[in-house]
Amino acid sequence: MTTRVLGKTLIDRERIRQRVRELGRDLSNSLADALRADGHDPQDDVDRVVMLPVMTGAVVFVADLIREMPLKLSMSVVSVSSYPGQATRSKGAALRGSLPDNLAGRHVVIVDDILDSGGTLELLRGAIMEQGAASVRACVLLNKLDVPKKPGILAEHIGFDIPDEFVVGYGLDYDGFYRNLPDIRILEER
C-alpha cells in the first residue's frame, strides 16, 4: 500500500514572505501603469482592479499578497477543479460555478497557487477576455519548470520556479489536507 508522507521543505516561510512582498510591489506597479495608461488615478479609481483568486489553493497566497498592494482593488473568487481528491497529476481544468459577470473594462489579476500544464489559466483567461476585460494578468506562487505547458500560456508574475514535484503547504493541499503548513514541502510516496 502506498502512503504519502511529508518530505523535505522546498521553500521555507521566510523566503515565501519575502517573495510575496516583492510580488505585491511588482504587481502594484504594473497595475498602476495600466491604470495611468487608461487615464485613471491608481489611488482614486475604485473598482478598476479585480483580484480573482482560484479557490481553494490560492486563499493563503492571495490573503498575504493583497496586504502588500497599496492599490484600491476588489476581489471575487473563482473555483476551478483540476486535482480532484487524491490525484497528484492534473485531470484537466473545469470551472466549478461561474465567473463574476462584471469584469468588462477592468484589470483582472488571476491569482493561483501553481502553474503546471496551464489548463486553469487558459480556461480563465479566455472567459475573462470574452467579457471585455481591459487586461488580464496571472500571478502564480509556483511554476513547475519541467511540465509541458499549453502553447502561449504564461504567468506574468511568478513567485518561485520549482521542479516537477507534488508539493503541499501555504494553501496547497493533498486531498484537502496540509494547506495550513507555513512552508512548502514535498509530499513523498512510500
Image (spheres, rainbow, N blue to C red):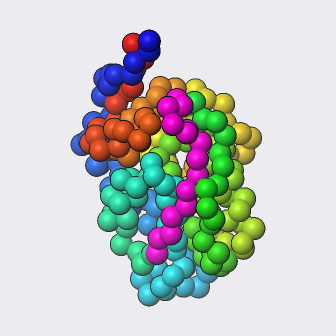
Image check: 174 left or right of 9?
right
Q: Quadrant of residue 10?
A: top left
| Front-lying residue, 49 or 112 | 112
Q: Nearer the viewer, residue 136 or 165?
A: 165
Q: Magenta span: helix, strand or loop, mainly? A: loop
Instruction: Return the residue nearer the eye: 180 or 28.
Output: 180
Taking 147 as reference, is 162 left or right? left
Q: Is residue 130 part of the magenta span, yes or no? A: no
**Quadrant of image for the C terminus:** top left
Magenta stretch in the rendered image: 74-88
Expressed as whole percent of the image width and height from the top left, the position of residue 188 reads 40, 20
Residue plotted at (65% across, 45% down): 93
Where is residue 178 shown, x and y percent of the image?
Answer: 34, 38
User: Eyeballing the image, is 68 above or below 167?
Assistant: below
Residue 55 can be seen, yes or no: yes
Q: Is residue 29 above or below residue 155?
A: below
